[in-house]
């Protein structure tokens, strides 16, 4: 394969994910420059052909596409905000930020980056490091359409790339939503194994049942999605009232078995709220409306910016759906990135 014409790429951040990303670019013939805050993490990549930059600035200057994948946005800000690092260097380049963060953080960073004459793409990596560059790896991406068109080929070295449009926050929203679903599933698994483990049933013996049960339950998701989109939650074989009654047994069994119910209690409370809102005859999908319409918890920091806060959770009313969350979030956000990074 002729890889001579592959564009150069820079990867900033050589943790488990950054190393995998850089490795995939190398495997696909991209001249790859790497930089990491702590020295020494690029050694193996250098042996495979990468160039290790001495500074973040040198790394940014090396390529038209700069991929950043560090722990969090604070780290991104620290790198981009280091004195002398960014001014004049980002202009004309594309910053692809694959660091996990919130839609608001992505939108703020996009504004900051475009203010420096650069294009911004935000991404969510839906894979663990060994999957990168292999079948099953998915990178969700959103932001500058021109930059995506120009660099889609380069990014495809990482796996399938799904472009979700111009809003830089959209990829992050999908990423966080998918992770929310994942943690719900993992939380359920942890609870299940803790319960059976309380009677010394080996997890390996019980887990195949969990897998087949969850797979069977997964088939109900498209119907729930359809009910939510149609705002018709009525046709159901498993009404909320029945589920709220049965859920009490999950809590009681946890207590009886000496297993914490901390993961289960919020779901029980939501089911109860559904019944209290006269939605006991509806299906589980009705709870999505309740999640979007409060009550906003006083201890939930996200509630402060919840566009749906204060809306009427009564059956049939759907004020949250009339709110465009992207616009509400955008309008309400301050330029925190500029605050952290300065205007230079
Ligand atoms: P690691 O903990 O392995 O690495 C963290 C990286 O961030 C290191 O390169 C570290 O540098 C760097 N870093 C942390 N703080 C700073 C800072 N203040 N300034 C500069 N660099 C900093 O994490 P991963 O590589 O696994 O994850 C990176 C991103 O990828 C995260 O946002 C994560 O959520 C996301 N991700 C990870 C997945 C995974 O399974 N690993 C899956 C999908 C997404 P140093 O070596 O100097 O400490």
Image (cartoon, rainbow, N blue to C red):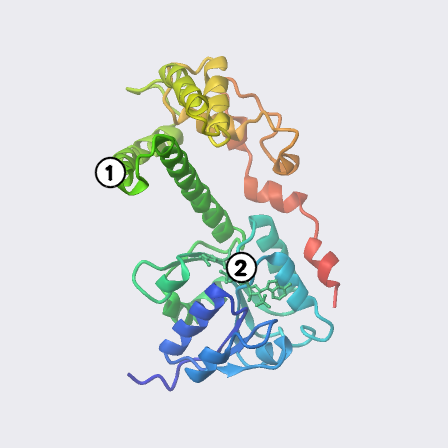
Q: At 40% across and 58% down in the image, what residue appears? A: 128
Q: Which quadrant does the N terminus fall into?
A: bottom left
- Relative vertical location of residue 244 with respect to residue 294 in this rendering, above or below: above
Q: Which quadrant does the C terminus fall into?
A: bottom right
Give the image location of residue 175, x and y in percent: 46, 50
Q: Secondary structure at mark 2?
A: loop
Please give left or right for residue 13 compared with residue 193 in the image: right
Give the image location of residue 203, x and y in percent: 32, 40
Give me the C-alpha separation between circle 1 and circle 2: 33 Å
Please give left or right for residue 186 compared with residue 343 in the image: left
Is residue 315 visible in the rendered image? The answer is no
* Residue 325 image label: none
Q: At 52% across and 30% down in the image, what residue appears? A: 292
* Residue 212 image label: 1
- Does the beta carbon of the residue at mark 2 sit less than 8 Å from ligand 1? yes
Q: Secondary structure at mark 1?
A: helix
Is residue 260 visible in the rendered image? The answer is yes
- Residue carrying label 2: 99
Quadrant of residue 190 within the rendered picture = top left
Q: At 37% across and 67% down in the image, what residue appears? A: 156
Residue sitting nearer the eye, 73 or 146: 73
Give the image location of residue 11, x and y in percent: 51, 72
For label 1, the crowd category at 10 Å Cα-Cα, with few meaning under 14, some 14 to 19 and many 20 or more, is few
Please give left or right for residue 331 compared with residue 194 in the image: right
For the residues labelled 1 and 2, say whether their Cβ atoms are less than 8 Å apart.
no
Mark 1 or mark 2, which is nearer to you?
1
Quadrant of residue 89 within the rendered picture = bottom right
């Amino acid at each position: 394969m002729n890889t001579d014409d592959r564009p150069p790429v820079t990867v900033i951040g050589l943790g488990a994910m950054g190393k995998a990303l850089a490795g995939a670019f190398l495997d696909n013939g991209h001249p790859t420059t790497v930089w990491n805050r702590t020295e020494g993490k690029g050694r193996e990549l250098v042996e495979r052909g990468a160039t290790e930059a001495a500074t973040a600035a040198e790394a940014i200057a090396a390529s038209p596409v700069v991929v950043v994948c560090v722990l969090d946005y604070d780290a991104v800000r620290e790198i981009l905000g280091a004195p002398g690092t960014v001014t004049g260097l980002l202009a004309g380049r594309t910053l692809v930020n694959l660091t996990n963060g919130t839609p608001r953080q992505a939108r703020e960073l996009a504004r900051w980056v475009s203010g420096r004459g650069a294009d911004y793409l935000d991404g969510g990596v839906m894979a663990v490091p060994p999957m990168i560059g292999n079948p099953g790896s998915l990178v969700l991406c959103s932001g500058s359409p021109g930059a995506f068109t120009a660099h889609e080929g380069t990014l495809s070295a990482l796996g399938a790339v799904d472009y979700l449009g111009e809003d830089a926050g959209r990829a992050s929203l999908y990423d966080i939503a998918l992770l929310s679903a994942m943690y719900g599933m993992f939380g359920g698994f942890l609870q299940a194994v803790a319960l059976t483990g309380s009677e010394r049933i080996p997890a390996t013996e019980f887990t195949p049942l969990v897998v087949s049960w969850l797979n069977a339950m997964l088939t109900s998701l498209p119907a729930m999605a359809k009910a939510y989109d149609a705002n018709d939650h009525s046709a159901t074989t498993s009404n909320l009232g029945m589920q709220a009654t049965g859920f009490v047994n999950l809590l009681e069994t946890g207590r009886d078995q000496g297993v914490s119910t901390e993961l289960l209690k919020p779901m029980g409370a939501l089911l109860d709220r559904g019944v209290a809102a006269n939605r006991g005859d509806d299906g589980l999908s009705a709870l999505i409306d309740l999640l979007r319409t409060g009550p906003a918890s006083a201890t939930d920091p996200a509630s402060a910016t919840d566009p749906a806060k204060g809306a009427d959770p009564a059956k049939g009313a759907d004020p949250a759906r009339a709110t465009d969350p992207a616009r509400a979030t955008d309008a309400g956000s301050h330029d925190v990135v500029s605050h952290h990074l300065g205007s230079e």
